[in-house]
Structure formats: structure tokens, C-alpha cells
Image (tube, rainbow, N blue to C red):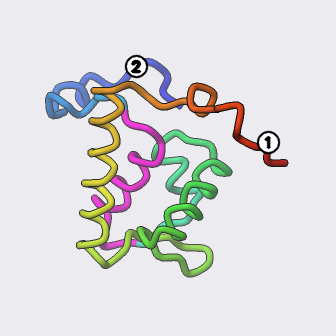
């Protein structure tokens, strides 16, 4: 987790948009993509990004289901299918833009009297 501060050299050398808030999934994908010449343990990714190891493991598992990362126990790497990665990124950005433009959907707002409760 962020401490609320960064080293002044990191600040000075950063791009203008580098500190825009990104969710943990985005941060993990960007990290793996930027370091696509290596495979990483979940704990190392978590340490580098300041995230909880269990959260990183869960996110990596979901990314693997989507075909966006590769896994050979205990290591993880970004997919070598760059077209799939770019497609997922475009879809993600589309959803973000829609959410910004129209607001986030909430299941409670969509619920009708005819919907059955799933248990």
C-alpha cells in the first residue's frame, strides 16, 4: 500500500500521468507487461507493487482464466499473445469510458420484482 509519499527523484523522473490512480489489476498487468522478459512469483509482484500477496494471487488467477497471463508454478508472466492483451485493454478502456460517461451500474438499481433471488 502507498505510504502517501514517494522519493523526490521518483517524482522528478516520472511522466506527467504516471501517478494517475490505477486499480490493482491494471497495476499488475502493467507491471508484467513492462517486465515481459521475466516471470515473477506472486509474492515478489506484491512486494514490488505494495499489495497484499493473497490479493495478487487472486488477481493473477482471474487474469489466467482470461488468458492474459501465463503460469508455471510458482511463476507468473504476461501472455505472449499481444493481440489478446491489446484487445482486453481496449475493452477495459471502453468499459471505463462508459462508466465515466453514464455512471457505474449497480445491481440494486437494475433489480425488478420479477427477478428471482439466487442462493
68 vs 7, left or right, is right
Marks 2 and 1, how far apart in space?
Answer: 45 Å
Residue 39 among those drawn in magenta: no
Disc 2 target residue: 5
Prevailing secondary structure of the magenta residues = helix
Q: Which mark is residue 117?
A: 1
Q: Residues within 10 Å of mark 2 (few under 14, many from 20)?
A: few
Q: Secondary structure at mark 2?
A: loop
Q: Quadrant of residue 35?
A: bottom left
Residue at the image position 39 percent from the left and 47 percent from the top: 26
Magenta stretch bounds: 22-38
Q: Name, please, the residue furthest toward the bottom.
A: 72
| Residue 33, position as x, y percentages in the image | 31, 62
User: Disc 2 or disc 1, which is closer to the eye?
Assistant: 1
Query: Is residue 5 depicted above or below 60 in this figure?
Result: above
Mark 1 neighbour class, 10 Å CA radius: few under 14, some 14 to 19, many 20 or more: few
Vertical relation: 53 (above or below) 72: above
Amino acid at each position: 500500500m502507498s505510504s502517501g509519499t514517494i522519493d523526490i527523484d521518483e517524482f522528478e523522473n516520472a511522466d506527467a500521468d504516471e501517478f494517475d490512480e490505477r486499480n490493482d489489476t491494471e497495476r499488475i498487468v502493467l507491471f508484467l507487461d513492462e517486465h515481459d522478459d521475466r516471470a515473477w512469483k506472486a509474492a515478489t509482484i506484491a512486494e514490488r507493487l505494495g499489495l497484499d500477496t493473497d490479493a495478487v494471487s487472486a488477481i493473477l488467477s482471474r487474469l489466467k482464466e482470461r488468458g492474459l497471463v501465463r503460469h508455471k508454478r510458482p511463476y507468473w508472466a504476461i501472455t505472449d499473445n499481444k493481440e489478446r492483451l491489446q484487445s482486453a485493454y481496449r475493452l477495459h478502456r471502453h468499459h471505463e469510458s462508459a462508466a465515466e460517461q453514464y455512471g457505474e451500474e449497480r445491481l440494486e438499481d437494475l433489480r425488478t420484482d420479477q427477478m428471482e433471488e439466487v442462493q
